[in-house]
Image: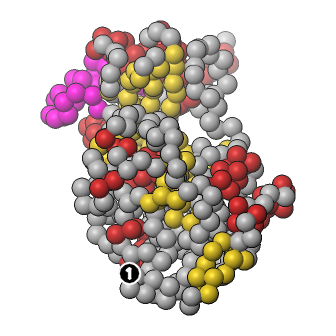
Amino acid sequence: MKRMVLVLVALVFFSVAAFAQKLTVSVMDLNVTEGLSGKEVVMLTDKLLNEFVTVGTYKVVERSKRDEILKEQGFQQSGACDQGACLVEAGQLLGVQKMVGGTIGKLGVVYAVELRVMDVKTGEIDMAFSRKYTGDVSNLLDAMKEAAFEFSGNRTQNISMASTEQNTDKGLTFLQKNKQGYKEYRNEKDGSVLIEIPASKFTMGSNDGENDENPVHTVYLDKYYIGKYEVTVNQFRKFVNSTGYKTDAEKAGGAYIYDDGVKKTDANWNNPYFIQADNSPVTYVSWNDAKTYCDWVGLRLPTEAEWEKAARGTDGRSYPWGNSWDGNKCNHGSSLSPYIDASDGYEKISPVGSFPSGVSPYGVYDMAGNVWEWCNDWYGDSYYSISPNTNPAGPSYGTTKVLRGGGWVFNADFCRSANRIHYGPVARVYHNGFRPAK
């Protein structure tokens, strides 16, 4: 009898100890963009909270207790609390380790769910959940259950739901979170590193540039992935060796280059007029060449909007690093002598990733300078005045394709994140390259 009592006491002790070691989490009311009523959002928030309780991985602060503490502490946030700074502040007042918040909205017939777990101590995103669903609101109840299981480390739960989202992670292997707090993946086909860009709105265009950068407008983009670096000579060589592909430059006998009035027609990606190393971005590739490469590795070219958001973030900055020009943060040329300016450390093209101080808010390299980068879109000089405010993909037809970023021969104005140029899809030029997306 004494032995049984001792066993029971031990079980109770270890149960209490295990509970005491649980991290404490609080769930804030979710933000709704459109398509849902206030009552529905409260229902979904409570469903998420209750699923956390059911899973049992965390110690959960109930809604009434949360509101009581925040009121006593004079929490000033009005409306939903779904952004990092707000979640961290609320978490500090509540005395919890983790905070959960996010956004739900309806675009047409599709519900978009974006949730995140914030670490209150570090202020960084621990985990993110991004899904799309069709059907009625009841499907979002399944989404809350799925999110709670995933955030609790249980991804094996078999949950039935009507989801329209394709498995965008297929072929990608998670690597790490970068210094900026965004997830990085490796594309297994070609080794490209892609950074996950979360769904959100951003400011596109500029009032300080060319006419085709107007009007400045707000764009919402779904989550996507974009190359951390431009595609390199070595990566492109592996593609050519594996497929026997002939680029537009090779089929035409080379790209046209003038040097002291002498036309050279033998330049191509593998025989460049301007010397490139294996880890330099590939050039002399046309839009057709870039798209063929992306198709082969299971990726695609970014849309113009995706490129610009990845370059400048959501605060409307002029350059990837901020609003002021800094020639030490990218590979660029001067407007007077573009071919011989080495003030940035490189007379000509530079290896990818050579300017860590010039990365974008998401940690993407070389979004200013080095090479112009092909985008998927047809070019339209007045497209911004008619483009949709959600996932714009460019005009439905055209004669030239958009490039972004500013090459190594161009000056500060061309290196602005909002600047646009365009070439025909068969053009092959010594300062044109590309980076992939998914």
Between 6 and 35, the one nearer to me in the picture:
35
The residue drawn where x is 70% and y is 50% is 292
**Helix, strand or loop for disc 1:** loop
Q: Is residue 146 above or below residue 302?
A: above
On the image, the x and y values in percent for residue 161 come to: 59, 14
Residue 81 found in image quarter: top left
The residue under label 1 is 335
Between 213 and 80, the one nearer to me in the picture:
213
Between 130 and 106, the one nearer to me in the picture:
106
Does residue 19 show up? no
Left or right placement of residue 184 versus residue 21 in this view: right
On the image, the x and y values in percent for residue 209 come to: 29, 61
In reply to whether residue 76 is colored magenta, the answer given is: yes
On the image, the x and y values in percent for residue 405 come to: 46, 63
Residue 275 found in image quarter: bottom right
In reply to whether residue 27 is colored magenta, the answer given is: no
The residue drawn where x is 30% and y is 60% is 210
The amino acid sitting under disc 1 is: Ser
| Figure coloring | secondary structure
On the image, the x and y values in percent for residue 270 come to: 74, 72
The quarter of the image holding the N terminus is top right
Q: Which residues are magenta?
A: 59-81
Between 374 and 141, the one nearer to me in the picture:
374
Q: Is residue 53 above or below residue 25?
A: above
The quarter of the image holding the C terminus is top right
The residue drawn where x is 24% and y is 23% is 67
The residue drawn where x is 44% and y is 36% is 391
